[in-house]
Amino acid sequence: MPGLSRLAVTRLVTSAFAWSSSGRTNDDLVTNLVRDRRLKLPAVEAALRRVDRKTFVLPAERGAAYDDRPLGIGYSATISAPHMHAAALEFLAPSIAEKGSVLDVGCGSGYLLAAFAALGPGVRAHGVEYVPQLAKMADENLRAHDASLLESGRVTVTVGDGWAGLPERAPFDAIHVGAAARSVPKALITQLAPGGVMIIPVGPAGGAQELLRVDKAADGSVSARTLFGVRYVPLVGGDKDEV
Ligand code: SAH
């Protein structure tokens, strides 16, 4: 396709898929993701069937809860499109297995925390969110989904700056970052356990961003590779996190 970068082609393909599916129930949503080959791992499929996306969207958006597209949740944030959540879960599920610990930076609606927890009864999912009102919303949504997750401490939501990670809960077998960083925050690399995987969008606000997969090997060495082009809201702050 002359004149189009690979990134642009990826975006076109992504958006063509992203807007094509719309369901009437959460099961429809998941079935559409499987049909469109956006979702392949049975463990992730089972987890997504256990988490009703409607519980995590604003009341005004409930009619669109089962569409495969991002929806506004206030404060310039969105609950990501289901195919992006599915992709992140598929990259991270193998390192979480059924009893790992995961950090979700910019947990917004709280949806992914519920989805991570649904991967297995031993999974612990910790969210850090910059906007206190959104952290409160995540807490309320999670309570409506399954209050025992918060009461047992398997899922936590902390107001804080994701550039610093969550040192009190580290290390993490998996880290998901839900907002685009200018560079990979150093603290997150430190807090990734050996054998752990981090998925993070990197790039300028509103510009060409790419989803990176960062692996920390058993010997502690770190490698990163680009997965595909994406568009996320910015991970605010981080001015002192020199590369
Ligand atoms: N993944 C979530 C939300 C994605 S929107 C969901 O699907 O619901 C990105 C979120 O990152 C927003 O809630 C925003 O407030 C948060 N955020 C932005 N910068 C942050 C930072 N430095 N630390 C923590 N959270 C941040």
Image (cartoon, rainbow, N blue to C red):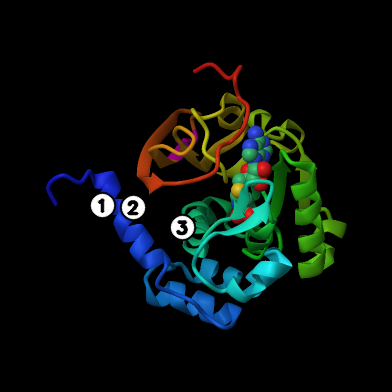
Whether tag 1 and tag 2 are in contact, CB under 8 A, the answer is yes
Marker count (numbered) = 3
Whether tag 3 and tag 1 are in contact, CB under 8 A, the answer is no
**Mark 1 sits on what residue?**
9
Residue found farthest to the right: 151
Q: Nearer the viewer, residue 137 or 89?
A: 137
What stretch of residues is rendered in magenta?
213-218
Q: Residue at x 22, y 43 (%)?
A: 5
Q: Secondary structure at mark 1?
A: helix
Label 3 to label 1: alpha-carbon separation: 18 Å
Q: Amino acid at mark 2?
A: Arg
Could you tell whether 11 is left or right of 184 in the image?
Answer: left
Q: Secondary structure at mark 2?
A: helix
Q: Residue at x 75, y 55 (%)?
A: 138
Instruction: In the rendered view, tell whether residue 193 sits above or below residue 156.
Output: above
Q: Residues within 10 Å of mark 3 (few under 14, many from 20)?
A: some
The percent position of residue 235, horizontal first and vertical second, equals: 58, 36
The percent position of residue 148, horizontal first and vertical second, equals: 84, 64
Instruction: In the rendered view, tell whether residue 177 sits above or below residue 143.
Output: above
Instruction: Looking at the image, tell me whether mark 3 or mark 1 is earlier in sequence order.
Output: 1
Q: Which mark is in front, 3 or 2?
A: 2
Q: Amino acid at mark 3?
A: Ala
**Mark 2 sits on what residue?**
11
Report the predominant secondary structure element of the magenta stretch. Answer: strand
Whether tag 3 and tag 2 are in contact, CB under 8 A, the answer is no
Does the beta carbon at disc 2 come under 8 Å from ligand 1?
no
Q: Secondary structure at mark 3?
A: helix
Quadrant observed for ligand 1 in the rendered image = top right
Q: Is residue 6 magenta?
A: no
**Mark 3 sits on what residue?**
87
